[in-house]
Image (tube, helix red, strand yellow):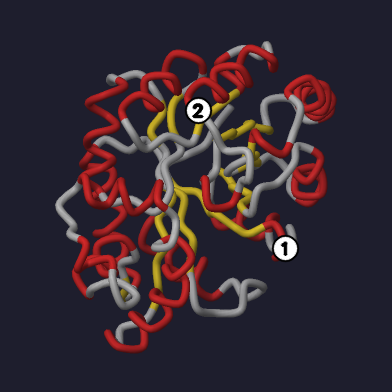
């Protein structure tokens, strides 16, 4: 299964519309966000030729592992080596029965019974990273910095997959870009898994308040011309990422302008 060095992260409600064009631009994988099911990936696979489609991520509290395994087997039969199942525990603020996430994740892996080569896990903290490399290809972190990418690489070793999501704003005006970034960040700065992780990597409680400090916003959601954003991607590569999946913000998701601009400097 090929992911390439750069992929795209798109929300499930935005639909698979431009997937074939993203493939033609040279992106190696499209990650479907917004807690998709396995079957939600089918239209995305149908819309493209050979690009890999991944769930980023399927929420384990919303599904039974046996059902997921059956749906996964159907997709893998119809689209060999093109579907990557990403799973994760989500967030306590969004799940009423969120208890013992590490144990729940281990049980879900057990219930799936799938080869580790067909899975990837959302993981931020050290214990979840350990489980990710034990039971899957590696980790798909979200809303993180290159410092976390470096930690993840050191924690799970040289051979496992590190594939962080990176939200970006293709906009050179700082205030305009930061306003776009803060609207996006508002949800995540209210989720304890993400805020606890940011506090581990040099940010403070003051950085988390009032929509996020400029320092935090610029680190997690870089902005600027495509060339500047290429440097932000390279920072994750230099820290140990194998694959970076970009989530351009602030423009019509059906437009390819941002994707084309980023492809010109990255692919």
Q: Position of residue 11 (x, y in %)?
A: 63, 59
Label 1 crowd (10 A; few <14 / some 14-19 / many >=20): few
The residue located at (31%, 22%) in the rendering is 156
Q: Position of residue 185 (x, y in %)?
A: 42, 68
- Nearer to me, 57 or 51: 57
- Nearer to me, 146 or 256: 146
Q: Seen in the image, is 35 located left or right of residue 251? A: right
Q: Seen in the image, is 116 located left or right of residue 185? A: right
Label 2 crowd (10 A; few <14 / some 14-19 / many >=20): few
Which residue is under mark 1? 13
Q: Seen in the image, is 197 located left or right of residue 49? A: left
Q: CA distance from mark 1 to mark 2?
A: 30 Å
Rendered image quadrant of residue 131? top left
Secondary structure of the residue carrying numbered label 2: loop
Q: Seen in the image, is 142 located left or right of residue 17? A: left
The residue located at (46%, 77%) in the rendering is 183
* Circle on res. 78: none
Q: Is residue 218 visible?
A: yes
Rendered image quadrant of residue 96? top right
Residue farthest along the left direction in this orientation: 202
Residue 243 to residue 21: above or below:
above
The residue located at (76%, 27%) in the rendering is 64
The residue located at (28%, 43%) in the rendering is 237
Residue 26 to residue 101: above or below:
below
Q: Is residue 52 visible?
A: no
Depth check, mark 1 against mark 2: the one in front is 2
Q: What is the quadrant of the N terminus in the image?
A: top right
Q: Position of residue 75 (x, y in %)?
A: 80, 29
Which residue is under mark 2? 100
């Amino acid at each position: 299964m090929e992911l390439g060095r750069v992929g795209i992260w798109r929300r499930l409600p935005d639909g698979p519309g431009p997937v074939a064009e993203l493939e033609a631009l040279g992106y190696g994988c499209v990650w479907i966000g917004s807690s998709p099911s396995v079957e939600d990936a089918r239209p995305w696979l149908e819309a493209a030729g050979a690009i890999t489609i991944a769930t980023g991520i399927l929420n384990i509290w919303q599904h039974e592992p046996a059902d997921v395994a059956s749906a996964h087997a159907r997709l893998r039969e119809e689209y060999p080596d093109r579907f990557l199942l990403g799973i994760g525990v989500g967030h306590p603020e969004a799940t009423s029965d969120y208890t013992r996430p590490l144990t729940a994740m281990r049980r879900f892996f057990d219930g799936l019974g799938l080869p580790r080569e067909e899975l990837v896990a959302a993981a931020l903290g050290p214990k979840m990273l350990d489980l990710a490399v034990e039971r899957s290809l590696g980790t798909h972190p979200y809303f993180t910095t290159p410092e976390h990418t470096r930690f993840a690489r050191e924690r799970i070793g040289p051979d496992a997959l590190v594939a962080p999501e990176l939200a970006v704003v293709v906009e050179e005006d700082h205030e305009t870009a930061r306003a776009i970034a803060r609207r996006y960040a508002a949800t995540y700065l209210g989720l304890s898994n993400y805020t606890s992780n940011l506090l581990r990597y040099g940010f403070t409680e003051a950085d988390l308040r009032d929509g996020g400090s400029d320092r935090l916003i610029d680190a997690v959601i870089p902005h600027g011309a495509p060339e500047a954003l290429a440097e932000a991607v390279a920072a994750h590569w230099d820290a140990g990422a194998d694959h970076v999946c970009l989530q351009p913000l602030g423009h019509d998701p059906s437009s390819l302008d941002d994707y084309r601009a980023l492809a010109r400097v990255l692919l």
